Amino acid sequence: MSQYTNYIGKPTSRVDGPAKVTGAAKYSAEFNVPNLTYGVVVSSPIAKGRIIKVHSKPVLKIPGVLAVFSHENVPNLAWFDRNYKDDVAPGGSPFRPLHDNEIKFNQQPIALVVADTFEVARYAASILEIEYEEEDHETDIELKRREGFMPGSGKTGFMPPPPPRGKPDKEWKKAAHRIEHEYVHGAQHHNPMELFATTTEYHADGTITAYDKTQGVYNCQQYISKIFGLSKKEARVINHFMGGGFGSGLRPQYQLFMSVLAALELKRSVRVTLTRQQMFSFGHRPHTLQYLKLGTNPDGSLAAVQHHALHETSRFEEYTENVVNWSGMLYQCDNVKLGYQLAELDVYTPLDMRAPGAATGSFALEVAMDEMAYEAGLDPLDFRIRNYAEKDQNMGKPFSSKKLRDCYHQGAAKFGWDRRNPRPRSMREGNMLVGWGMAGGVWDASQQKAAAKAVLTADGHLKVTSAAGENGTGTYTIMTQIAAEYLGLPIEAVTFKLGDTDMPEAPVQGGSWTAASVGTAVKSVCEAIGEKLFKLAQKMKGSPLKKAKFEDVEFVNGQIRLRHDPNQSVVIKDVLQASGKEQLEANTSAMPNYLKQMPYSMHSHNAVFAEVKVDEDLGTVHVTRVVNAVAAGRILNAKTARSQVLGSVVWGISMALMEETVMDHKFGRYMNHNYAEYHIPVNADIHDIDVIFVEEEDDIVNPLGVKGIGEVGLLGVAAAITNAVFHATGKRVRTLPVMLDKLL
Ligand code: MOS
C-alpha cells in the first residue's frame, strides 16, 4: 500500500491554520447576526429538590429584558417531544431542560433570561429570585460501594464485559506471585478553551440557523427538529470551527436547547453562551473505583487477571463506558474475570471524555502490571512482552494488524530504557529523585457510515463537502490531502468544507473514527469524479486513453495518465473544457465493509515511556521526558498526527498530576469549577515529548488503512508517569492525581 506519493502521509501544515490565527475562523459565539438578543442561563445552587417559585416579574420590569423562560412557562409550549434521545445518549431518560420543577443536580440550568444586551441579561439573571425546597442528596460514590449494578440499557456500542474465562479465582489463589489493589480517580471535566455557545439566527420565514458548538451538526439538527417539531429544512445547524471538544460536544448541550427555544418564542435571533463555571455542569469523566487482582506463574506468564470497575452515573441515565474489557485482551491470559458496575448519584450524567473508559482502565491495569512486574522480579517492559497477546482473547479473533511489539521496541530504544536500574530510588540528580516508568494501551479502530459530495469546476478546482467535524484535530487538512491525492490535483486546487447540515451526512466527530469514516467517503467521492473524468477524457479527440480501462490510469500532477506509460496523458482541466461541461458532480456514501472486517479484531495500540524528577524535599513532580510510540495504521499527515499525540501526552500529564474536580458533598457541588482551581498544565510543565508512529499496514480496517489517533495517544500516559514516580520515590500512588501530599 505504498502507492501514495503526493499528499497522503506528508507532514502538511493545517489548511485552516491562517484562518485560525488571523481570526477569520468564526466560532459559535462570534456570528454577529442582525438584531441579536442575549440569553443568560441561571443554574441551580442546590443539588436536589424542587423549585417552588420563579419570581420573574421584577426581572421582566428591567428595561431591555425580553423574557424569562423556566419550567413555569416552557412546558406549555406544545412542541416538546418528551421521549427524544440524541444519537449518542446513553440508556435511560435524558435530562430535559426547563421541563418541570424538579432539581436533579447542582448547577442544573433552571431558567434563561433573555435581553437586548448581554450585560442586561447577565444582570437580570443575577437577581432572579427563585425559591426552592431542598431534599437530601447523595453525591459520594464511596458510600455507594455496595449499591453497584450492571447497566441494562447501555448506549449504542456499549460492550458489556465478556463472561469469565478459565478459572480466574483458583488460578489467582495458587499463583506464584500475586497483587491486589484498588485504583481510583475522581471526576474530571473537559476543559476546552472555547465556551459552549449557540447563536440561533431567526429568519423572517420562521426557519432557524443554529451556529452551535458541537462535535455533530446532524445529531444537533435531529435533536432540535424532534424537540421543537421542525422539519430538517427549517432547522440548519452549523459548526465550522471548534475551540476543543474532547467529547464534551458529542451530545447536544443545553445552551442549544435554550437558544433555539428563545429564538422560536421571541421570533428573534438569540445567543446563549455558558460561563466557565457552567462548563462543569454537563458531563464529566466519571469518578471511578477499580479493583485489580493479578497473578503470575513462576515463568512470568500471567496466571490470572481480574478487573472490576464501579463508576458513577446520574439518577436518570445509565452512562456506560468500556473500562475493563481491555484487560481481557491487552495481555495473553487464559483465566480472566471482568466486572463492571454503575452507581446512581445526584449528579449530571457523565460524558465521554477523550478515550472514555480506556484512559481510566489503562491507568489501573498498567499501574497494576508495573506492581506485578516488581512483585515477580521482572522488568516491566519484559513482563509485558512475555505476555504479549497474539490474538484478541475476548473475541477469539486475530487482530487485523497489531504492531504493539514495535511500539515497545522503538519506544524503549528512543527512551534508553535498557539503561534503567530497576531499583526504586536508584537514580538521582542532586535533590531530584529520577524515575523511569512505562505503560501502554489499546483503543478501537472503527469506521462509521459517512457521505461526501464533490464538485469539480472547469477551472480545475475541486470542492468536497461533508458535514464532518473539526475540533482542532486536522480534519480540514487530511480531507484536503485525500482529495488532492485521489484526483492528482495540486493541494491548492482543493477546498474541503465541513460542519453544516446542508452538506452530506457524517457521524459525530468522536471515537477516533473521523479519518476512517469521512476519509473513506472523500476517497470514494473523488474516485467517482475520477471515473466521470476518465469517460470524458476517452471521448476527447485523439485521446491517448481511448482504449484504456479505468484501472489502467492514474491521476497525478493534474493529469490522467496511463500507469504503464506516463507520457500518455490528458490534462484534467482540458477534459472539462473539451466536454463543454461547466462542472462535474458526484455524491457518495461509504460504509464499513462488515464482511471483510467480521473475522478480525481491529485496534490501535501504544507504548509510553516517561521520566520524572521528584523534589525529595518538596514532593513536586516534573515530567521531564516522554516517548509515546503509536501503532495506528496509516498516518495521513505526520504533522497534524504528531500534534494530536503531543496533546494527548499533555493531557496525560494533566491527568496524572493535576486534574480532579472536587465535590463538596455537603452541598453536592463541584467546588473548583474554574481555570484557577481546576489545574491543567501550562507551558512550563511540559518538557521533551517524542512521538513515534510505527509502520502498520492494514487493508482490513478501511480502504485507507487508517485507524485514527485522537484517543489512543492518551492511553498509558498517566500510568507511565505514576510508575515513574514509584521508580523515583519507592512510593506507590494508586489515586490520581499524584500530588505532593501523597509523596511526602
Ligand atoms: Mo471523543 S471522547 O469520542 O470526542
Image (spheres, rainbow, N blue to C red):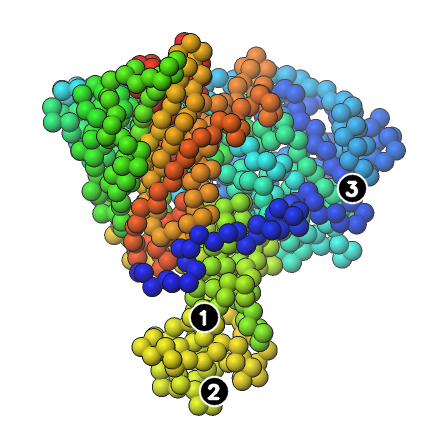
Going by the numbered disc 3, the residue's amino acid type is Thr
What residue is disc 1 on?
557
Q: Residues within 10 Å of mark 3 (few under 14, many from 20)?
A: many
What residue is disc 3 on?
37
Q: In the rendered image, which quarter is residue 440 located in?
A: top left
The percent position of residue 649, horizontal first and vertical second, equals 43, 34
Going by the numbered disc 1, the residue's amino acid type is Asn
- Residue that appears at 65% across and 20% down: 45
Give the distance between the C-alpha atoms of the residues marked 3 and 2, in whole angstroms.
58 Å
Q: What is the quadrant of the C terminus in the image?
A: top left
The answer to whether the residue bearing label 1 lies less than 8 angstroms from the nearest atom of ligand 1 is no
The percent position of residue 404, horizontal first and vertical second, equals 27, 41
The percent position of residue 665, horizontal first and vertical second, equals 54, 14
- Residue that appears at 77% across and 35% down: 118
Say if 732 sits above or below 417 in the image: above
What residue is disc 2 on?
540
- Residue that appears at 40% across and 55% down: 9
Give the structural element (helix, strand or loop) at label 1: loop
The percent position of residue 279, horizontal first and vertical second, equals 60, 31
Q: Tell me which numbered mark, 1 or 2, is placed earlier along the sequence.
A: 2
